[in-house]
């Protein structure tokens, strides 16, 4: 504590549409051949369509070097030339364009995404990077940008909060590519999406959205339904024998809505039914629906009727297919992996669907029937099914309330059956990313099934380890509120979520709320399960963290000791629960300045964790890093740096240097280097750690603030006093805002910045900080805590700077007696204090006493730290020792 020296995303939008609902799986031509070749994920530009292509979707002279997530091009794209020219003009003359539906079409279906897809393929050769970003949910944006970071060859990890800032910066700088196009598709929330835009650079951004508010921040163009000629062109492309008059009547009935035109074209191609007969069915269905449904403002009743005709026909041919659509209508309008249906052999939803879920052949037939009627997009290359939101709305509206409840619950059960059950496994993260939008949209958080609730908790944990801490906290908070209302605060799964939310709030620096929640959760566990229950003991360990946030270190240590003893009796010394309690006890001992006891405890805990969990397990390495602090603070500076260098190497080798745990280890190592006299190495590593935490979390995040608190001392040692003062003052403000002005960490930061201010000659400002730090430490920790003594040494040096040498000697002498008794004569902090007593004595003319003490102190410095250590050379030169503080992680 003290120092001694101075998925490929498939579009759900209709529009200028592919005549077959399967993305990239065009409808068979009369000779049985497909109309186009489907691109693999990440393949640059697909091959030229083989028949009736759009005149503009031809082979390119060149393709982007980086191409990803873009849906397959539409070989049956028709019309929209004026709109495409407007997009082109807006992006040539500006940097952002937004494609919005006409205000009358709130649910979409007018083809805005199809226009974006066509634009991307038509002008692909203008860009080096083209990246499609599904944007309806922030986590989908994070997923796409994280993948882009790796495709750009950026040296970043898979955690979103590391990769996303890196990719935005690379695009801003134009390195490695400056001609880039990002397509933010379905960007409905302006304020949620804009922060992900690169700030500057020479690239372009294309937005598709149903939100008219984009006109405040981007040049926009409005997409309406097809012109009549466009509708007829698409109809006749699929149903080639359709007369112009029949095509006109069909388009008129469907309001020229592109998505409805697509479905009608598929109906004509499949059934060959005459247009008059089809229109008669639609009109009869309109009359029927008018009695059953409340008309929707989002689509004409004729559209609902047309789809209802297809749905009833589908139900007659294959009831399981309709039920599959009904369940899917409660998922997000994003690709749904077929594996979601393959792993549900015991799920009970509806009779025919249950049978199909247990028989892969029947399931395949159901999906094929859906494809035939163009009611969903089936993408065989990636084995997904996707419903447009308009189709979902019609499906939901035609179900009774009980059917809706049953099918929504069925969706939840399917999701729970697909739970990967290992949020920390990086290889499973793509599965969590695929499930996430459906978990959110289906409102799985409201389900009463324990298995579904377990999935929600797993998603929260995944979001945390993946790096979306804000998203994890938001989901945990919503789940806690809903579960508390539904099941009560004493429900065990509710309590588990409360612990997760408290943890996340602490990680986000919301200390006050976190501490309150930790206390409340622990109290509830004790009340319902008793003090010896495993869940209670775990909650009490978390409570200790909350108490430390409130500066209640003694009470936290008391609970730590009790929990460890009870865990030891209940589970044995090598049980993971006991080892967690033992690790937390080591932290509590350190924070109370009981370093020798902490050293003994952590040595044993590290040994047992290595045997039980493995030598390079994260928990093992965490305890070993804590042991380095124990070694350092018991005075073994040289041993501590050797030990922590090894721990850091193991972190990097096993988890990468950008892993947050590795960066936290680097922060501890930087302090160890400084204590051992390697100021240059400490500064370099401290700068790196701060940069990594700030780029990942921002300057106000707890880990970033802790790094800054240490770097203040490194900068001062390097002579960068102005920067040290600026960073130090900012750190004081940040700690005070999160922990309060009386917390020992805030007071430690004030003690450190006072040293820098004194060296800058600003004694008045240094006085102000120390006048708060010393009495505050005494009140919080007592007179003999090492942090209190560090503040006292700073105050004594301040007295000396003011020429009040007698006051300095009195304060230093008292500190020396305590340090000698508690830390030993050879502890570096004891020696630093003795060195200052020497200078106090000389200033008062007591040279004989000073010389004798100086000789003894210098001998001990050389024996303890070596001849060349900066503390030893400073003592030999009769320079006053500055004792700073490195806050211990809690």
Image: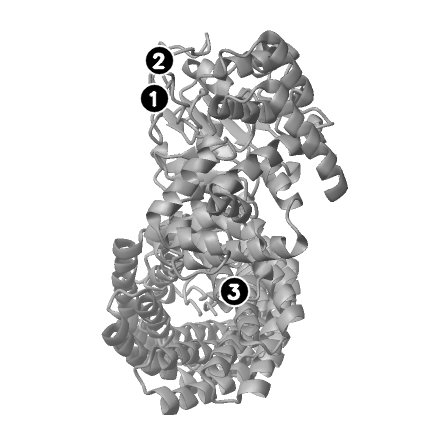
Q: Residue shown at 44%/69% (left/top)?
A: 2
Q: Earlier in the sequence, mark 1 or mark 2?
A: 1
Does the image show residue 187?
no
**Pointers 1 and 2 in contact (C-beta within 8 Å):** yes
Q: CA distance from mark 3 to mark 2?
A: 49 Å
Residue 11: x %, y % from top left: 50, 32
Residue 396: x %, y % from top left: 63, 45
Query: Which residue in the protein does label 2 denote?
Result: 50
| Disc 1: CA contacts within 10 A as few (<14), some (14-19) or many (>=20) | some
Query: Which quadrant holds the N terminus?
Result: bottom left
- The one of 174 and 772 positioned closer to us in this rendering: 174
Query: Which residue in the protein does label 1 denote?
Result: 37
Q: Residue shown at 63%/40% (left/top)?
A: 393
User: Which mark is nearer the camera, 3 or 2?
Assistant: 2
Q: How is the image coloured?
A: one colour
Q: Secondary structure at mark 2?
A: loop
Q: CA distance from mark 1 to mark 2?
A: 8 Å
Query: Which residue in the protein does label 3 denote?
Result: 453
Does 674 sit left or right of 390 as displayed?
A: left
Q: Residue shown at 45%/69% (left/top)?
A: 888
- The one of 464 and 494 positioned closer to us in this rendering: 494
Q: CA distance from mark 1 to mark 3?
A: 42 Å
Q: Earlier in the sequence, mark 1 or mark 3?
A: 1
């Amino acid at each position: 504590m003290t120092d001694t020296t101075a998925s490929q995303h498939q579009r759900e939008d209709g529009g200028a549409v592919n005549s077959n609902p399967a993305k990239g799986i065009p409808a068979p031509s009369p000779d049985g051949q497909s109309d186009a070749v489907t691109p693999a994920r990440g393949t640059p530009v697909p091959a030229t369509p083989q028949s009736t292509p759009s005149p503009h979707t031809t082979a390119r002279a060149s393709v982007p070097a980086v191409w990803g997530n873009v849906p397959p091009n539409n070989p049956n794209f028709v019309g929209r030339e004026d709109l495409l020219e407007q997009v082109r003009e807006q992006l040539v003359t500006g940097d952002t364009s937004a494609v919005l539906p006409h205000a009358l079409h709130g649910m979409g279906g007018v083809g805005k995404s199809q226009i974006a897809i066509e634009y991307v393929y038509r002008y692909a050769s203008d860009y080096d990077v083209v990246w499609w970003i599904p944007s309806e949910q922030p986590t989908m944006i994070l997923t796409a940008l994280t993948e882009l970071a790796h495709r750009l060859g950026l040296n970043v990890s898979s955690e979103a909060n590391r990769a996303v800032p890196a990719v935005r910066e690379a695009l801003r700088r134009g390195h490695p590519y400056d001609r880039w196009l990002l397509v933010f598709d379905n960007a409905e929330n302006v304020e949620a999406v804009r922060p992900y835009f690169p700030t500057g650079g020479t690239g372009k951004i294309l937005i598709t959205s149903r939100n008219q508010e984009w006109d405040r921040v981007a040049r926009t163009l409005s997409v309406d339904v097809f012109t009549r000629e466009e509708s007829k062109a698409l109809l006749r492309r699929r149903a080639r024998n359709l007369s112009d008059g029949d095509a006109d009547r069909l388009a008129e009935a469907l309001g020229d809505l592109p998505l409805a035109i697509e479905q009608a074209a598929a109906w004509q191609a499949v059934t060959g039914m005459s247009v008059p007969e089809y229109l008669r069915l639609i009109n009869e269905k309109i009359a029927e629906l008018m009695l059953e449904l409340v008309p929707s403002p989002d689509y004409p009743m004729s559209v609902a009727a047309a789809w209802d005709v297809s749905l009833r026909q589908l139900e007659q041919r294959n009831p399981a297919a309709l039920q599959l659509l009904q369940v899917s209508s409660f998922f997000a309008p994003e690709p749904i992996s077929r594996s979601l249906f393959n792993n549900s052999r015991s799920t009970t939803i509806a009779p025919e669907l249950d049978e199909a879920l247990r028989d892969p052949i029947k399931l395949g037939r159901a999906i094929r029937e859906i494809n035939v009627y163009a009611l969903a997009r089936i993408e065989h290359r990636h084995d997904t099914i996707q419903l447009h939101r308009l189709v979902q709305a019609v499906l939901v509206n035609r179900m009774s309330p009980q059917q809706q409840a049953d099918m929504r619950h069925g969706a939840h059960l399917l999701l729970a059956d697909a739970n990967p059950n290992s949020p920390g496994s990086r290889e499973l993260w793509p599965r969590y990313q695929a499930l996430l939008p459906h978990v959110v949209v289906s409102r799985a958080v409201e389900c009463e099934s324990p298995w579904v609730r377990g999935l929600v908790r797993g998603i929260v944990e995944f979001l945390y380890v993946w790096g979306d801490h804000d998203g994890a906290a938001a989901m945990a908070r919503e789940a806690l509120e809903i579960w508390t209302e539904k099941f009560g605060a004493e429900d065990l799964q509710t309590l588990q979520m409360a612990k997760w939310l408290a943890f996340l709030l602490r990680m986000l620096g919301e200390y006050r709320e976190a501490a309150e929640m930790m206390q409340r959760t622990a109290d509830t566990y004790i009340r319902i399960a008793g003090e010896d229950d495993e869940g209670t003991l775990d909650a009490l360990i978390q409570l200790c963290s909350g108490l430390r946030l409130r500066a209640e270190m003694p009470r936290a240590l008391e609970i730590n000791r009790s929990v460890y003893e009870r865990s030891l009796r209940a589970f044995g010394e090598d049980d993971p629960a006991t080892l967690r309690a033992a690790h937390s006890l080591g932290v509590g001992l350190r924070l109370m300045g009981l370093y020798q006891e902490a050293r003994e405890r952590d040595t044993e805990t590290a040994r047992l964790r290595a045997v039980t969990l493995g030598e390079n397990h994260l928990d093992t390495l965490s305890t070993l890093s804590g042991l380095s602090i124990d070694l350092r603070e018991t005075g073994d500076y040289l041993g501590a740096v050797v030990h922590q260098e090894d721990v850091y190497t193991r972190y990097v080798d096993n988890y990468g240097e950008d892993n947050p745990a590795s960066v936290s280890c680097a922060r501890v190592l930087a302090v160890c280097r400084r204590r051992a006299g390697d100021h240059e190495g400490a500064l370099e590593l401290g700068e790196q750690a701060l940069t990594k935490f700030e780029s990942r979390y921002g300057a106000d995040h707890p880990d970033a603030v802790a790094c800054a608190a240490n770097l203040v001392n490194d900068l001062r040692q390097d002579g960068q006093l102005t920067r040290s003062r600026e960073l130090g003052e900012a750190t004081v403000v940040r700690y005070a805002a999160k922990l309060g002005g009386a917390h020992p960490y805030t007071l430690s930061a004030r003690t450190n910045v006072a040293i820098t201010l004194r060296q800058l000659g600003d004694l008045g400002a240094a006085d102000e900080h120390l006048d708060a730090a010393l009495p505050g430490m005494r009140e919080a920790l007592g007179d003999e805590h090492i942090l209190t003594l560090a503040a006292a040494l700073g105050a004594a040096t301040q007295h000396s700077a003011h020429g009040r040498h007698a006051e300095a000697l009195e304060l230093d002498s008292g500190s020396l007696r305590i340090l000698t008794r508690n830390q030993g004569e050879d502890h570096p902090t004891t020696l630093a204090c003795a060195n200052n007593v020497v200078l106090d004595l000389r200033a008062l003319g007591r040279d004989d006493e000073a010389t004798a003490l100086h000789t003894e102190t210098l001998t001990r410095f050389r024996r303890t730290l070596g001849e060349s250590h900066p503390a030893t050379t400073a003592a030999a030169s009769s320079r006053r020792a500055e004792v700073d503080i490195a806050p211990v992680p809690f």
